[in-house]
Image (cartoon, rainbow, N blue to C red):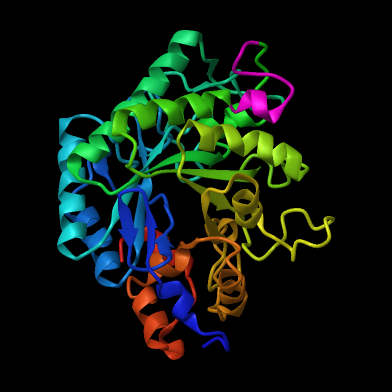
Amino acid sequence: MPSFSSDILFQPFTIGSLTLPNRIVMAPMTRSFAPEGIPGSHNAAYYRRRAEGGVGLILSEGTVVNRPASRNDPGIPFFHGDKALAGWQHVIDEVHAAGGKMGPQLWHTGAVKSFMSDWTPDAPVESPSGIDAPGVQRGVAMADADIADTIAAFAQAAADAKRLGFDTIELHGAHGYLIDQFFWSGSNQRDDRYGGPSIGERARFAAEIVAAVRAAVGPDFPIVIRLSQWKQQDYKARLALTPQEMAQWLEPLVAAGANVLHCSQRRFWEPEFPEIDGESGLNFAGWAKKLTGAATISVGSVGLSGDFMAAFGGESSTSVGLDRLLERMERNEFDLIAVGRALLSDPRWVAKVREGDAEGLHGFEPAALRELV
């Protein structure tokens, strides 16, 4: 186990109406085990096991809002329609019965093609400019009515989540999916109010979604938004090259009502702006907290030797110590830490960390992606 005490991970944390027993978040991970978009008892049991294992906050796999072609794989669950919402009601009831807290991740995949299957939706895929990446034409550009309907679909999904009893929601604004496609100049070439040369201008779509969700759920219900610089279309893409640009990107989201910024990095220990001295190598979540004052979640290869994109390429990862994580949390760089593949393989990962069971912490094998452990 690390030389640093793990006590910092097990301190409570409160945001709005939500109080968590510890600082560990289960990161959203696409599983594609929801036939016809309906989560079943196997999904509920999967999440309940993480609650029983001591996860502070569970964020669900991406679950899509009510738009044509909002998902890119047939096993991705809906968060709309009576049958799907009944399935999610069972999920949250099971998680609460085990003493857990949970929020659904609300998603629209935009023009991104799945790397898990060759399935294509019946309707044309949609994106800001009808492209998936620079020079890659895919689908259709969204008209004003499409944008308005999409914003309304996110707000309705959030309202349904609160009605079902979920404790929070997360908006998926990262990794090159629809909201992120509006952020990125490589996929947003619009010349209307949803485009523009600056990241602050291109953040309008996301800010309007956050504002609509805030109106739908009220003032105290926590809203999380997941963000990333990198895209699956381009790992080296960066939306903000300076702290000033990052502030232009993030401040409108917080002003619109986002409580928590979930800052995705492939490796959480890497500094966001390494060329800037005097900031102790703050990572993405550290800079987001410093610039906006909002609570932040960090994420990226926690407890494992390799990053998660390598896992989809069939690479395994070994278990590593948590010293770098605990050091950053001790200095209050960020508030919460999201754990992905380690929890995907082992629902008792949190309990083992708390118990100091170093021998019980195992690595990750890609075979774990093929079942709900």
Magenta span: predominant SS is loop
Taking the magenta stretch, the answer to whether it contains residue 226 is no
Residue 27: image quadrant is bottom left
Magenta region: which residues? Answer: 192-203
Task: Give me the residue at 48% from left, 81% from top.
Answer: 6
Residue at the image point whose x is 51% and y is 88% from the top: 1
Q: Specify whether residue 187 is in view.
A: no
Q: How many marks?
A: 0
> Where is residue 92 drawn, in percent x and y?
20, 51
Identify whether 322 is placed above or below 369. Answer: below
Give how far across and how far down residue 241 sits, in percent.
77, 42
Q: Is residue 356 left or right of residue 309?
A: left
Q: Is residue 26 left or right of residue 231?
A: left
* Above/below status of 30 relative to 76: below
- Can residue 223 be seen here? yes
The x, y position of residue 331, in whole percent, is: 61, 70
> Taking 256 as reference, is 239 left or right?
right
Towards the viewer: 164 or 174: 164
- In this view, the residue in front, 7 or 59, is 7
Point 15% across, 31% down: residue: 82
The answer to whether residue 278 is above or below residue 199 is: below
- Location of residue 350 by image quarter: bottom left
Q: Residue at x 15, y 40 (%)?
A: 86
Vertically, is 336 above or below 264?
below
Q: Is residue 193 magenta?
A: yes
- The quarter in which the C terminus is drawn is bottom left
> Measured from the top left, where is residue 85 in percent x and y?
19, 37
